[in-house]
Every structure is written in structure tokens, then in C-alpha cells.
Image (cartoon, rainbow, N blue to C red):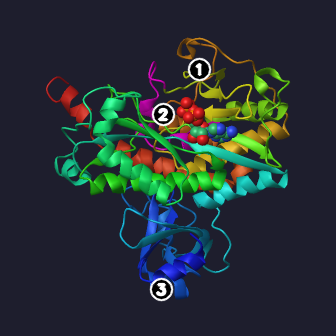
Amino acid sequence: MSFEQLKSKVTDGSIDTVLVCFVDMQGRLMGKRFHGVNFVETSFEETHCCNYLLATDLEMATPDGYASTSWQSGYGDYVMKPDLTTIRPVPWLEGSAMVLCDILDHHNYQPIAHSPRAILKKQISLFEALGFEAKMATELEFFLFEKSFDDIRKDGFRHLEPISGYNEDYHIMQTTKEECVMRPIRNHLFAAGLPIENTKGEAEAGQEELNIRYSPALDCADYHSFAKHAIKEISWQHGRAATFLPKWDKDRAGSSSHVHQSLWKDGKPAFFDKSAKYGMSKLMGHYMAGLIKYAPDYTYFLAPYINSYKRFAKGTFAPTKTVWSVDNRTAGFRLCGEGTKGVRVECRISGSDINPYLAQAVMLAAGLKGIKDKLVLSPATTGDIYEDTKAADIPQTLRAATETLRNSSFLREALSDAVVDHYIRAAEWEQEEFDRVVTDWEIARGFERA
Ligand code: ADP
């Protein structure tokens, strides 16, 4: 929706509320609800938010140790600058539209370097400088539950019952039973302007997948954030809960967010060379070699929480090896669309809890490094890669991923020391919070028998 269209809808009264949002480190939409008239008259220029919002956690804590903000510095403001190209209706809420903002310094109006949207924009611009456009698609997997978030929370997150009783991978019969939630999700997102491809049942009871057509990287991350938010809200409106926690039950499959990637030049697929093996251009080989070489460095951005690492189990389609393969789902990276103009690489390491801006940005940085250093891609691997002892592993815990990130000269160069140190602090804090907790597992194991 253009700004002019929004203005006329505010004038005719069909829109009265504008959600002015930005995406935080955790990938959530944060912001304020403006009266439509105020937004189109003044607030479209800018509004403000407290700068702790880019230095907090899922609980909205105020951890120490961030250089960007603190109690000592008084937790000042950021400017939220609406990006008017992102205005869209919010069809599942009455009379509402939404706009996404960039986060700027309150004094000099420069982008805040550690804000996720700024991090992605920087990597996109480096490709643009070389004449390339990055196009991406992120798949959204999640579980739907019988009860609402509120009922589940009041029940202490126990007795979790997924919406279906059996593995519903590609099932039409079971997914028909879920159409009361999934159809509005598809249709509201489509009406909001997102190029929705499909939803399908996934390989576990209650597990769903939403696919959005690939698009320029920034749009893809904007779509992902908007869609994830919509899925939770629309489920809530129907008395259900949708979770993007990668692993909610140790005995069930986890949820991923695979990232499909390709580069384009002058509107043509730059990863495609019809005379080459798999139709894969030299450029694509270098890009993939960079992705694979630096996967351990950027794993934190594909798996940012303690729980993210519980998903990486053998025989579950969640890969842990930094190798590639042709149409094999056990490798960290899979070549898709081989021999066609749709040739692309899919990263399968990323979990459903990714921040799409950060995940895409670090992979673009790795791909760019591969191109600049002309890295050579090793041959494709075959067979069950879980059993391949020669293939390199990604870090297996948040603690290990944090240390790999800390020591990554590649990411320090690509993102800057300040940005890397900011996210290291986020990772450390997550670990510190977990380390303080006595878990149910410890009690059950040791209460009587220790
Ligand atoms: P699958 O069977 O693995 O789900 P799909 O053909 O449905 O594969 O495609 C998965 C995702 O890949 C879709 O979101 C699609 O839009 C995206 N995709 C297709 N072509 C490209 C491309 N050239 N670059 C990036 N993503 C692409």
C-alpha cells in the first residue's frame, strides 16, 4: 500500500490504526499503535523508542555489558524512521495497517549498526555495488497446538497437545482439519501483499510449513517477520497457539527455517550456467564455498538460543555438517533446482527461531567472501552425511557457537567489531540466564537418587 493510499483510507475511515514497528534482535515486531490521522499528518516522519529494545532478551530484561546502552548512560532514545515502502494492511485486525521502521541514532540520524535491518541492508548494498541482487526465500515451520498461548502458560507449559494426532507430512486430510487457522493465515497474508505460495503439513504431529515466494533479500526478511507475527496472532484469534521454538519435545522433530539463496544480475540468474555441471555457475561455486567454510563462524545467527541446539540431532533432517549435497536433506547445504534457471542453494542449518535479517546477512557476507577470495567448492557429498566422520561439524552448543563467533576474524571484518561484540553479549546473556536455572530434568534425575 502506498503512503497516498494509506492517507485516503485514513480519510475515508477504513483505516484508523497504524502499527509502527521495527524488528528487534529476537526477530519480533516491536513498536506502537498510532491513530491513523496522527500517523499520516506527523508521525510518518519519525517516532522514538527506548534504546534498550536492541539490548534486551525475550523477557525484556536489561542485561549489563552492552557498549551501546546501559543504566549508566541512562537508556536514551532511538529514532524509529518509517520505511514508507513497507506500508501494508493488516487484514486480520480491523481498520489496521502496519509500517516497518529503520532504527537511527537520535542525534545524527545515522543507522544503528547493530539493528538487524541495518545489518542486512549493509550486506545487500555490498552486492549491489558489484551489480548483483540477492534473492532469498525463508521457509517458516512451526507447530500448532490445540489450546491458546494463555491457557498453555497458565498450565505451566505442561500437557502440550499438538493440533493433530499423527505425522501430517503432506497430508491433505489432516490439514483440512486445520484449515480454520491455516486458510486465514494464507489469505490474510496474501491480502497484505505477501506472495504466499502454499502451506503444507510437516513431518510431525501438528507441524506446519508456510512458503513465501522468493524475493529480494530485504523483502524476504520483512515478509518473514510479518508472517511469523501473523501466524501467532491469527492462531491466537482462533484460540490456538503457534510455536516457533525449534524443539519443544525431545522425541519429536524440530522446526527449521531453511534459507534459499540466489544471486541475480540484470534480471538474470547469475548462479545459472547451462553448460556447467548441475547448471551451477563459477560464481555460485565460490558463493557456496564461502557459505560452507564460514558456517561455524556464523552458526550463532542460525541458532541463537539454548533450545536451538536441541534440534541438531542425528536422523531428524536437522543437519550439523558443513558440506553440500545435491537434493540430499541430510547435508547442511543442499543444491536445489539443478540444471535449471532456478538453481539455488538452500541452507538447512537454520532453525525456526532465526532472526531472518541476521541469518541472511551473515550468509551473504560468507558468500561474498567466497566470491572475493575465489574459494573452491569441494565436490558434493552423497549418502547419509550424519555418518560422514570426515565432514566438518558446526558448533553443537550455544556456548561453542559464541566462542566461534568471538574468534571469527571474518565476521569481525564483515560486520565490524562493535556489531559482533553486541551479539556476543546477547549470546552470553542467554547462556548466563540458562545456567542460573535448575531444570526439571535435574530434579527428576537427582531428587531421590543423587
Ligand atoms: P521444496 O520442495 O524444497 O519446498 P520449492 O520448489 O517449493 O522447494 O521451493 C522452496 C522455496 O525456494 C520457495 O519459497 C521458492 O520461492 C524458493 N525459490 C525458488 N527459486 C528460487 C531462487 N532462484 N532463489 C531463491 N529462492 C528460490
Residue 351 image offset from top left, x and y in percent: 49, 38
Q: Nearer the viewer, residue 68 or 224?
A: 224
Q: Nearer the viewer, residue 225 or 354?
A: 225
How far, Cα to Cα, is label 2 from label 3?
53 Å
Observer able to see residue 261? no
How far, Cα to Cα, is label 2 from label 1?
24 Å
Residue 80 location, quadrant: bottom right
Instruction: Tell me the residue that label 3 is attached to.
Output: 11
Q: Nearer the viewer, residue 74 or 209?
A: 209
Of the 4 image quadrants, the one containing the C terminus is top left
Residue 8 part of the magenta-drawn span? no
Residue 155 image offset from top left, x and y in percent: 16, 47
> In the rendered structure, which disc, 2 or 1, sits on the residue that comes first in sequence?
1
Query: Element at badge 1?
Result: loop
Residue 317 appears left or right of 366:
left
Instruction: Tell me the residue that label 1 is attached to.
Output: 328
Residue 425 image offset from top left, x and y in percent: 52, 52
Residue 67 image offset from top left, x and y in percent: 57, 63
Query: Element at badge 3?
Result: helix
How far, Cα to Cα, is label 3 from label 1?
54 Å
Crowd around label 1: few <14 · some 14–19 · many ≥20 (10 Å): some
Residue that appears at 82% across and 35% down: 283
Total marks drawn? 3
Residue that appears at 57% across and 16% down: 385
Residue 261 appears left or right of 125:
left
Instruction: Tell me the residue that label 2 is attached to.
Output: 397
Residue that appears at 23% across and 50% down: 148
Tell me the quadrant of ligand 1: top right
Residue that appears at 83% across and 23% down: 276
Residue 163 appears left or right of 413:
left
